[in-house]
Amino acid sequence: MLRQTQAKAPAGGRSFWRLATRLILIAAVAAGLLWMLHRSSESFDRNTQPAGFARGVLHGALMPLAWPNLLLGRDVTIYATDNTGRLYKLGYTLGVNGCGALFFGFFFWRLNRWHTPQTVG
């Protein structure tokens, strides 16, 4: 019985496009998040009511995303000075920790997948 071998395309070209696609996707998601942060910051600045628990969670979750905006010279609100007190601070803390757990959890999960050998079959 003869075995037929198939010519394989060089992996270098495929990995380049895969990397390029990932970088473009990351840049698009980052641009979208920065735009969302900038727009939400503007709307929060116009709101006259004190910030409560829900806005505290949102401010906390978006706070890590403020760094690139601040580097670009845009002044974004990352903490409402006019807030309801303890409830806002609890929400803010929950938002920061939830965002960090989500980001670092995903990061370490991917890192672990890269280092763990995948068995097939």
Image (tube, helix red, strand yellow):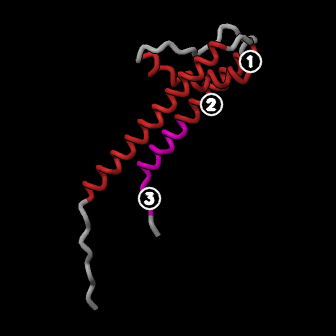
Q: Main secondary structure of the magenta part?
A: helix
Within 10 Å of the Cα at label 3, are there few (<14), some (14-19), or many (20+) other Cα atoms? few
Q: Residue at x 58, y 16 (%)?
A: 78
Q: CA distance from mark 2 to mark 3?
A: 30 Å
Name the element at disc 2. Answer: helix
Quadrant of residue 59 in the image?
top right
Q: Which residues are magenta?
A: 104-119
Say whether residue 109 is left or right of residue 96: left
Q: Which residue is mark 3?
A: 118
Q: Give the amino acid type for the residue marked by disc 1 in the picture.
A: Gly
Name the element at disc 3. Answer: loop
Quadrant of residue 49 in the image?
top right
Q: Which mark is residue 86?
A: none
Q: Residue at x 68, y 20 (%)?
A: 56
Q: Nearer the viewer, residue 89 or 109?
A: 89
Q: Residue at x 52, y 30 (%)?
A: 33
Labels 2 and 3: the sequence-earlier one: 2
Q: Any magenta on residue 15? A: no
Instruction: Work out whether 63 lies above or below 112.
Output: above
Labels 1 and 2: the sequence-earlier one: 1
> Residue 30's x, y, as percent?
46, 32
Q: Residue at x 39, y 44 (%)?
A: 22
Quadrant (top left/top right/bottom left/bottom right) for the N terminus: bottom left
Q: Which residue is mark 1?
A: 52
Say whether residue 47 is left or right of residue 16: right
Name the element at disc 1. Answer: loop
Q: Which residue is mark 2?
A: 98
Q: CA distance from mark 3 to mark 1?
A: 47 Å
Q: Give the amino acid type for the residue marked by disc 3 in the picture.
A: Gln
Q: Give the amino acid type for the residue marked by disc 2 in the picture.
A: Gly
Say whether residue 30 is left or right of residue 14: right
